[in-house]
Image (spheres, grey):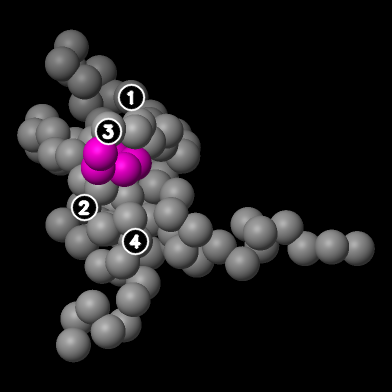
Amino acid sequence: MYQRETDFEIWKPIRGYEGLYSISNLGRVKREKRVIVNRRGTRQVMNERILKPYHRKGKGLEVTLCKDDHKRTFLVHVLQREHFETSFHD
């Protein structure tokens, strides 16, 4: 029996987006499950899902995160480094 790479995956909430998005040590970004009120005023369940990053020429993989109707784009490798490399905060 072998172990899959995802068996060793560790998730941490993205700072400033706690409860909304998380990043893994493997560089995957996911949206957390939550309930929102949409523009028509009805409650909507947003299920957890892995975001699909897109490649920006010359920059690398990027994801767009949304909080309070404001969108912001992040480089995946920078998020991963900020949340998993201990020397980054020293």
Q: Position of residue 56 (x, y in %)?
A: 27, 33
Q: Position of residue 13 (x, y in %)?
A: 32, 60
Q: Name the main secondary structure of what is drawn in magenta.
A: strand
Residue 80 is marked as 4
Residue found at x 41% / y 45%: 30
Q: Rounded to the nearest whole Å, what is the CA distance between mark 2 and mark 4?
A: 14 Å
The residue at which mark 1 appears reads as 44
Q: Rounded to the nearest whole Å, what is the CA distance between mark 3 and mark 4?
A: 17 Å
Q: Secondary structure at mark 2?
A: loop
Q: Rounded to the nearest whole Å, what is the CA distance between mark 3 and mark 1?
A: 31 Å
Q: Rounded to the nearest whole Å, what is the CA distance between mark 2 and mark 3?
A: 22 Å
Residue 17 is marked as 2
Residue interval drawn in magenta: 58-62
Q: Rounded to the nearest whole Å, what is the CA distance between mark 4 and mark 1?
A: 29 Å
Q: Which label's residue is closer to the chain start, 2 or 3? A: 2
Q: Quadrant of residue 34?
A: top left
Q: Is residue 85 magenta?
A: no
Q: Residues within 10 Å of mark 3 (few under 14, many from 20)?
A: few
69 vs 78, left or right, is left
Q: Which label's residue is closer to the chain start, 3 or 1? A: 1
Q: Residues within 10 Å of mark 4 (few under 14, many from 20)?
A: some
User: 69 above or below 42?
Assistant: below
1 vs 35, left or right, is right
Q: Are marks 3 and 4 in contact (CB under 8 Å)?
A: no
**Residue 34 visible to the viewer:** no
Residue 56 is marked as 3
